[in-house]
Image (cartoon, helix red, strand yellow):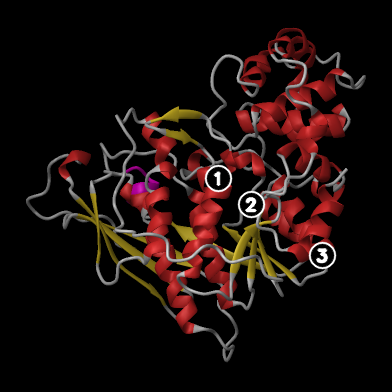
Amino acid sequence: MATPERTSQDARPFRPADFGVFRFVDRSLDREGVVRLRYALDDHIEFEERLQLPMPAAGTDVDTELVNGLLRLLHWVAGVSYYKTAIPPTVAFVGEAPPSNTAHLLEALYSEGLGEFAVRNGLPELPRPSFAGGAPSAEPAAPRAPRRVLVPVGGGKDSAVAIETVRQSGLPLGVFSIGSAQAIVRSAETAQVPWMRVTRTIDPAVREGRLEGALNGHVPVTAIVSCVALLVAALHGYDAVAMANERSASVGNLAFDGVDVNHQFSKSIRAERLLSGALLDITSELQIFSILRPASELAIARAFARMPQYHAGFTSCNRIFKLNEAQRLTTWCGNCDKCRFVALILAPFLAPEVVAGIIGRDLLDDESQYPGFALLTGTGGHKPFECVGEVEEAVAALRLLRDDPRWREHRVVARMVADVLPRFPAGAGDPAKVLRLSDDHAVPPQLIPAVRAVLGA
């Protein structure tokens, strides 16, 4: 892999303001499945990302035009990881520029998708590079009946529920992952279906923080994962990718520069629709949707509680995915917003000893965890920048725990019932409303019976 290079006269410190153009240089996919994605800041610093894809058996009929179109889309979407180092005002393309639907997706990912990044870095406004997108050329097509479905798996509860929902439909099913974290391995092995594994190697200058002074922070990674999944699906004959993004992912964290900044922007229904539109620039034979979009995180937790085969192996703590391998954990950290949120929404549906066995300790009986749990309800600040559900869901879970003799005496639960619940009107966080399935989704009609069977009451 080529590391970032500078010209001989460019030994000065890295200053983001010095760069004017982010360039999409080139991309390739060889016969061994190695993808190379190359980018540059001006003509001085180059980046190369690599992915190792599972390739189909020799002689398999592959739609080369489709694969090339998806490779272009991946190149453009994955560039956000390198654009963020300097957020120059202009983007430029070696070769063709994105068509209109794709340009609209990219403009959203490189602005709203960097909303949290902008807030945390103290930027005065969102980055807003132009990808020269005119009016979108087509509305996303109506969902079609899929024939073979690929489900991305991250080792958490959501992807397990997505797998079992697709399985309930009776359609042929495979799973896909980037990397092989232990939780992913355990989930994929529990599923016992074909597993497509991809290795992603981010340029070491970004992965290891070698560019002193470069900007750093959260990027819309789910959009990148989605594009890799689509590429793998095309190579292996799947005509649908079923993501595990819930409806709660569409709710933001705070307002900034005229937008609702959302840590989970690339999981939102808006991003899903934009990606579906971009896919139409390439093909109408492949579709992507979230099988869990009708459901809240609380409803997904209820469904997951009925799947004990996954309980011992899953991990929803995002610290298992840190770029810096020295900081990466292999299981629950037990002290982050995600760990607390998962404990809170599983608790109404499982016994205390089961939840404690999953996470490693009883967070809801640990007084020191109270401020973090309160924050999940918006008490003491905005909803955390993490993959957690809506404030209403946290309140609904708390209402259920208040009435549950197994949980109501736990110290955090008792304190939140006394101090937090009175802040909300009686109708806020109604569990029945939160658990109800929504009609705002793009799930193909043929899969709706399975969604209702798995995620319903």
Whole-percent x and y of residue 118? 37, 34
Q: Are marks 1 and 2 in contact (CB under 8 Å)?
A: yes
Q: Is residue 3 left or right of residue 374?
A: left
Q: In 3D space, how far apart are the residues under numbered discs 1 and 3 (Cα atoms)?
A: 30 Å
Tell me which amino acid carries mark 1: Phe
Looking at marks 1 and 3 on the same chain, the residue that comes earlier in the sequence is marked by 3
**Camera-side residue of 264 and 136:** 136
The residue carrying pointer 3 sits among few (fewer than 14), some (14 to 19) or many (20 or more) residues within 10 Å by Cα, namely some
Could you say whether the residue bearing mark 2 is in a helix, strand or loop? Answer: loop
Q: Which class describes the residues within 10 Å of circle 2: few (<14), some (14-19), or many (20+)?
A: many
Residue 252 sits in which quadrant?
A: top right
**Mark 1 nearby-residue class (10 Å; few <14, some 14–19, many ≥20):** some
Give percent across and percent down for residue 430. Answer: 78, 26
What residue is pinned by disc 1?
A: 321
The magenta segment: 205-209
Under circle 3, the secondary element is: helix
Image vertical order of residue 14 relative to residue 75, above or below = above
Q: Residue at x 64, y 74 (%)?
A: 238
